[in-house]
């Protein structure tokens, strides 16, 4: 049955991916023990970094792997924060509420996907933005939120500042690792190949037996889950919820920036993009308007000279998502 | 590949009509074949050949008529389901997954319509690559392939699904004489594997090297069907091609 190809072998991991995985694990460990060697300010910043990585990875999953460009992902960020407030007001411990909020947003995104994924290209992108604005307005109508007055996650006051800082940081780190792990597992599976096939050519994917709609739904819901979780964690770290800061399109703009600069369609690229964004913000945010001009200029330089992003220029594969074929005497073709 | 052991199947299409608004592209098409056949379809531009292919493969729903695969009505089923049941189509303009390697492209077919998992999927992909002469290019990014290789990749992807029927839409178009000959050799090789072939082609002489039966379409209808030589000399066919007279 397989007589025609007796001497071929498939490898998923290479030397680079083995080193890459170990390096990532080491970085994760280093981050986990950060509270023992870093001050309070640094911990707060690292929490932000984890949230940025989460956001970038999720937008990249949707657009870079799934070909679904959305400019309304702030919807899930805002809803994640809002769900945390609501759950906490209902008596749930605020940290448990953060985790549940991610799940709640994922649950909600399922019916949303049934409608939105029928839209194509630009219609989908704008449709998501419209939906984000509608959810913003609906949240405004909640008497608990009272328009833009907002609400604080008051239940957090039960914990002292230091405990809170550490809890939020570890939750952010855990959420980031969990969601990155989920995405990695997805990309490695047969669904991961299907998602990329749909991105490159939906009709051809369909004629090869790929159920495009279902596959897109999976990536859409995962992306909503990660971003919802990010919104919930951001709230736990900032404590006050004001709808317009959470439902702001600026969040999606940041996601797009991080992914384009880091390298769209590359898992490592989104992470690198988040780190670059984080550094730019850390060093230049205080310069106000010049910071924003700098972000815009950086985006322009990258799209003109490095359209595949920083990681695209590096071109390394640190994660075992691909398939490399070895034939006969071990020659790589 | 399991194709060699697949029991023979049938395609049967009856009364197929397809309208785009006021335009009738297909009109009362009756067509049947078994996996033992290689059927060529010719006809002038606009005769409805590619539309018939799309209706048979499930990419387009017909406005009238029904399509049966192995005696089962599949008219309401889309391309993903039909391809999983062994009805595979290649596209006139190759549609490679440019972000994936050649092997990964083929693996999509093996894993989805082919229904293979793990090592079995790898083997199905290897066999398909081997059959279509793509093995040396396994690790190449599909983006970097030339036209002949893109066409061979279309074929390899289709073969990896273990098809009963292969619907080839102008797979020879745009190739040089030598390249087309290479492709003909590959397709002839498939005949011994019990795969039924439907092949639309403008270049009639390469088609005749594979097809044991020829259908000529014109203006959405089948105007001749049978032995290739007889069809090519049929007065109606000659008129459709040369016009007037």
Image: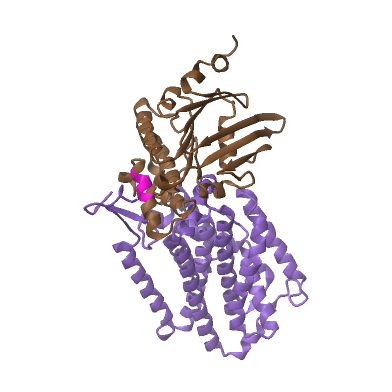
Q: Quadrant of residue B243?
A: top right
Q: Which chain is brown?
A: B
Q: Which chain is purple?
A: A
Q: Quadrant of residue B14?
A: top right
Relative depth, front residue between B32 and A255: B32
- Please give the name of the residue rendered at 58% of the width and 34% of the height, measured from the top-left corner: B52
Please say if B8 is above or below B202: below
- Confirm whether the magenta stretch covers residue B129: yes
Relative depth, front residue between A141 and A148: A141
Q: Which residues are magenta?
A: B125-130
- Confirm whether the magenta stretch covers residue B110: no
How many labels sit on residues?
Answer: 0
The x and y percentages for residue A103 are 60, 73
The x and y percentages for residue A259 are 49, 59
Q: Is residue A152 visible?
A: no
Colouring style = by chain
- Left or right relative to A313: residue A103: right
Q: Quadrant of residue A78?
A: bottom right
Instruction: Characterize the magenta stretch by its predominant secondary structure.
Output: helix
């Amino acid at each position: 049955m397989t007589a025609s190809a007796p001497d071929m072998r498939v490898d998923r991991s290479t030397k680079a991916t083995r080193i890459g995985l170990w390096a990532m694990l080491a970085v994760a460990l280093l981050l986990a023990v950060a509270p023992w060697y870093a001050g309070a300010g640094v911990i707060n910043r690292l929490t932000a970094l984890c949230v940025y990585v989460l956001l970038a990875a999720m937008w990249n999953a949707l657009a870079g792997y799934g070909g679904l460009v959305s400019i309304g992902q702030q919807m899930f960020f805002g809803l994640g924060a809002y769900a945390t407030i609501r759950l906490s007001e209902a008596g749930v411990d605020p940290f448990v509420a953060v985790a549940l909020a991610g799940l709640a947003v994922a649950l909600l995104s399922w019916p949303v996907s049934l409608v939105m994924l029928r839209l194509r290209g630009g219609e989908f992108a704008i449709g998501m933005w419209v939906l984000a604005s509608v959810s913003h307005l609906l949240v405004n109508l909640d008497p608990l939120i009272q328009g833009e007055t907002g609400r604080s996650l008051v239940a957090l006051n039960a914990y002292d500042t230091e405990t809170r800082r550490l809890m939020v940081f570890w939750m952010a780190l855990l959420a980031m690792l969990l969601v990155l792990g989920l995405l990695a597992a997805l990309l490695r599976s047969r669904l991961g190949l299907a998602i990329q096939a749909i991105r490159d050519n939906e009709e051809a994917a369909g004629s090869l037996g790929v159920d495009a709609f279902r596959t897109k739904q999976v990536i859409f819901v995962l992306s909503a889950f990660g971003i919802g979780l990010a919104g919930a964690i951001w709230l736990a770290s900032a404590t006050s919820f004001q709808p317009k800061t959470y439902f702001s399109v600026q969040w999606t703009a940041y996601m797009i920036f991080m992914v384009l600069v880091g390298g769209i369609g590359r898992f490592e690229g989104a992470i690198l993009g988040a780190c670059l964004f984080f550094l730019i913000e850390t060093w230049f945010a205080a310069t106000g308007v010049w910071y924003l001009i700098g972000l815009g200029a950086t985006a322009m330089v990258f799209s003109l000279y490095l359209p595949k992003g920083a990681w695209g220029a590096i071109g390394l594969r640190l994660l075992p998502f691909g398939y490399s074929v070895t034939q006969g005497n071990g020659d790589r073709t | 590949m399991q194709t060699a052991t697949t029991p023979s199947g049938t395609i049967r299409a009856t009364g197929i009509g397809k309208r785009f608004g006021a335009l009738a592209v297909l009109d009362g098409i009756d067509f049947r074949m078994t996996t033992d056949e290689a059927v060529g379809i010719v006809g002038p531009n606009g005769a409805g050949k590619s539309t018939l292919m799309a209706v048979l493969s499930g990419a387009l729903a017909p406005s009238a008529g029904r399509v049966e695969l192995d005696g089962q009505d599949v008219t309401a089923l889309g391309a993903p389901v039909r391809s999983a049941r062994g009805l595979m189509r290649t596209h006139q303009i190759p549609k490679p997954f440019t972000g994936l390697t050649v092997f990964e492209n083929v693996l999509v077919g093996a894993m989805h319509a082919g229904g293979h998992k793990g090592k079995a999927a790898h083997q199905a992909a290897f066999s398909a690559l081997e059959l279509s002469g793509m093995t040396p290019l396994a690790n190449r990014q599909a983006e970097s392939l030339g036209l002949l290789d893109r066409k061979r990749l279309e074929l390899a992807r289709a073969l990896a699904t273990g098809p009963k029927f292969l619907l080839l839409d102008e797979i020879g178009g745009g190739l040089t004489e030598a390249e087309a000959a290479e492709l003909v050799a590959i397709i002839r090789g498939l005949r011994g594997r019990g795969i039924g072939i439907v092949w639309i082609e403008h270049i009639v002489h390469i088609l005749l090297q594979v097809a044991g039966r020829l259908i000529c379409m014109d203006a959405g209808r089948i105007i001749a069907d049978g032995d290739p030589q007889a069809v090519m000399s049929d007065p109606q066919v000659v008129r459709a091609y040369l016009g007037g007279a």
